[in-house]
Amino acid sequence: QVQLVESGGGSVQSGGSLTLSCAVSRRITSFNSMGWYRQAPGKERELVARMRSTRDKQYADFVQGRFTISNDNAKNTVDLRMSGLSPEDTGVYYCNVKGWGTTEYWGQGTQVNVSS
């Protein structure tokens, strides 16, 4: 069983920054893709950013250049650096890794609160 543990969430004011980190219990190079999702209260979970390699990254439209996803193969971590945060970015952020078939794993989530 693969375990994903997120950290780095917290409370910031509008315009602030946070960096989320996801520690994966298996070599991240064994996965097809890694990503971050979020779920706001009363809303469905949505993609924030996903990557297959350093040259293959996908961001949701609402990111608008404010977030950067990256990975560290030596540490088996996936980070999400967020800046220019707004109250609309409030929610629980989840780390996700997908295997080469239908297998995927989720972390338990980390809360991000942005106040105006």
Image (tube, rainbow, N blue to C red):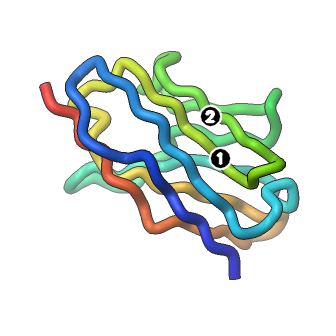
Image side of residue 46 versus residue 57, left or right: left
Residue 30: image location, x then y, percent: 86, 61
**Most extreme residue toward the front, as rendered?**
75
Please state, as top left, top right, bottom left or bottom right, where the C terminus lies in the image.
top left
> At which x and y percent is residue 73?
81, 47
Q: Secondary structure at mark 2?
A: strand
Q: Amino acid at mark 1?
A: Val
Q: How far apart are the alpha carbons under marks 2 and 1? A: 7 Å
Judge by depth and name the residue closer to the eye, 2 or 100: 2
Q: Quadrant of the N terminus?
A: bottom right
Q: Which residue is mark 2?
A: 69
Which amino acid, by three-letter code, is at mark 2? Ile
Residue 45's quadrant in the figure?
bottom left
Residue at left offset 21%, top offset 53%:
41
**Is label 1 in a helix, a strand or a loop?**
strand
- What residue is shown at x 41% (from left), y 33% (from top)? 18
N-terminal-most mark, 2 or 1 = 2
At which x and y percent is residue 106?
56, 66
Label at residue 17: none
Q: Position of residue 82 (x, y in %)?
A: 45, 28
Contact, CB < 8 Å: mark 2 with mark 1? yes
Residue at left 75%, top 43%? 72
Q: Which mark is residue 78?
A: 1
Q: Judge by depth and name the residue closer to the eye, 17 or 105.
A: 17
Left or right, 80 with reference to 104: left
